[in-house]
Image: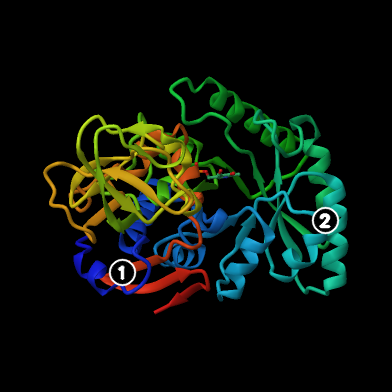
Amino acid sequence: MNLDHIVEQWKGRPTYAVIDLDAYARNVRIMREHIRDEARYCVVVKANGYGLGAIPLARTAIQNGADLLAVATVDEGAQLRRAGISTDILLMGPAGPAEKDLAVGMDMTVVMNDIPFAHGLAKTVREDGRSKPLKVHLKVDTGMRRFGVMPQDAVAAARKIMSFPELRLEGLMTHFASADVPDLSSAIEQVRVFDQVVADLEAAGIDIPIKHVCNSAGTVQFPEWHKDMVRSGLATYGIRPAPHIPLPGEAGEMKQVVTIHSMVARVIPLEAGDSVSYGGTWTATEQGRGALIPLGYADGYLRGLSNRGYMAIEGERADVIGRVCMDQTILKMPVTLASQTRQKVVVIGNGTDDTPGAPDLEELAELAGTIPHELMTTIAPRVPKLYVRDGQVVGLADLDGYRDL
Ligand SMILES: Cc1ncc(COP(=O)(O)O)c(C=O)c1O
C-alpha cells in the first residue's frame, strides 16, 4: 500500500496509525481458508481489536468470513452491539456479577466459569423476559490455571447449566498456556485433558455442540485441533504467534495490519558531550544531530525502548537516543539525511517495501522485551487511527471515538 497520498491528505496530528483494512480482510480470508471447513471462525477483537479499533475490524471480519466475534469485557461487547453488529459475540470474561444485565440485554454468549455465576445469569435472563435462552459456553481449566472449571467438575457444571431453561449450553472451551513454543508437550496435554472431558460428558449423555481450544498458535499449526471452532486474534492481525510459526498462505500474503507514522518536529544540534533527554542517559561523542519525534510513552511507545528502539526517517534507520519521554522521543539523525523538519518517520513498519528501514511490531516487541500484543494494545487513544480501504481513508478513530468517513 502506497501511503504517500494518505500522508499528504491527513490534516491532523503528525503522529498517527494507519490500519490497512484490505490487509485485514485478506488475513481473515486466508485464515478462513486455512481453518477446517466444519469449524467456525471466531475472530478475537477484545481490547478494542488489540488496540487497532474493534468496530471497523469486526465489520471487516464479518464481511470476510468470521462466524463469531470474541471480546473480554461486557463493555467491549456492548460497544459492538451499539455499532449495529448483530453477529454472535463470545464474552470470554470473566464478567463481574453487576455486569449480567448488560451482557444479557446485549445478547452476548457468555463464558461460564463457575456455577454461582450460572445461577445469577439464569435469574437475570428470567427477569429480562427474553423469549429465547441465552447461549453460554463452559470453560474448562485444562492446565492454564487462570479460569474455568476444573476438568473433574465439568460434567456436574454442564448438568447444572443445562438444568436452567434460561440458558443454552452451546459451547465447551479451553485455552492454551503454551501453544506458541517449540516444546508442545503442555499444549498436547491440554488437548488430551479436554478430549477426556468431552468423553466424560458423552458418557454422561451430554453433547455440547461447539467445542473449541485453539488460539492463533493452535489454529495456524494444528488443523486437527480446530474441532468445532477456533478463536484467533494475533494471526488475524497479521502477526506470527512466534518467529518459528509461519502464517498460512504464500509467504508475505498475510500482512501486519497496523503501521505507525510521525514526522521530525525539530532537528536538534548536538555537540560532543551533549547529553540527551531526561537523566542524560545518552551522550554524544561527536558533533551530530538529533531528531525530535512527537510521540512518547503516553502514545504507547514504551519507555523500555529508551536507547534501544529505532524508527525510519525517510527510509533510513534512526536509533532512539536517551529516554523516551511522555510525549516525545529523540532519534539520532542519520548523517546521510538533510537537516530538515517535517521529514517522514515510520515508527512501526509492516516489514514490507512500503515501510523501508522501520522495525515491524515483532521486532520492536523483541527490542522492548515484550510481545506484539502488548505493543498493539498500548497504542493510546490519542494516536489518531486512519482506516484505509482501496487507498482511501474510510474511517477515523481519535479521542472522540470511531466514525466512518
Ligand atoms: C480465551 C482466549 N482465546 C483466544 C485468544 C486469542 O489469542 P491469539 O491472539 O493468540 O490468537 C485469547 C487471547 O489472549 C484468549 O484469551
| Disc 2 within 8 angstroms of ligand 1 (CB) | no
Position of residue 382 measured from the top left corner of the image (x, y, whole percent): 48, 63
Q: Residue at x 32, y 72 (%)?
A: 393
Where is 402 relative to 166, above or below? below
Q: Residues within 10 Å of mark 1 (few under 14, many from 20)?
A: some
Check if mark 2's residue and mark 1's residue have beta carbons within 8 Å: no
Disc 1 marks a residue whose amino acid type is: Arg
Q: Residue at x 37, y 34 (%)?
A: 307
Q: Residue at x 65, y 50 (%)?
A: 92
Quadrant occupied by the N terminus: bottom left
Q: Residues within 10 Å of mark 2 (few under 14, many from 20)?
A: few
How many marks can you see?
2
Residue placed under numbered mark 1 in the picture: 389
Residue placed under numbered mark 2 in the picture: 97
Disc 2 marks a residue whose amino acid type is: Pro
> For this view, does 282 lie left or right of residue 68?
left
Where is 172 relative to 64, above or below? above
Position of residue 196 measured from the top left corner of the image (x, y, whole percent): 67, 29
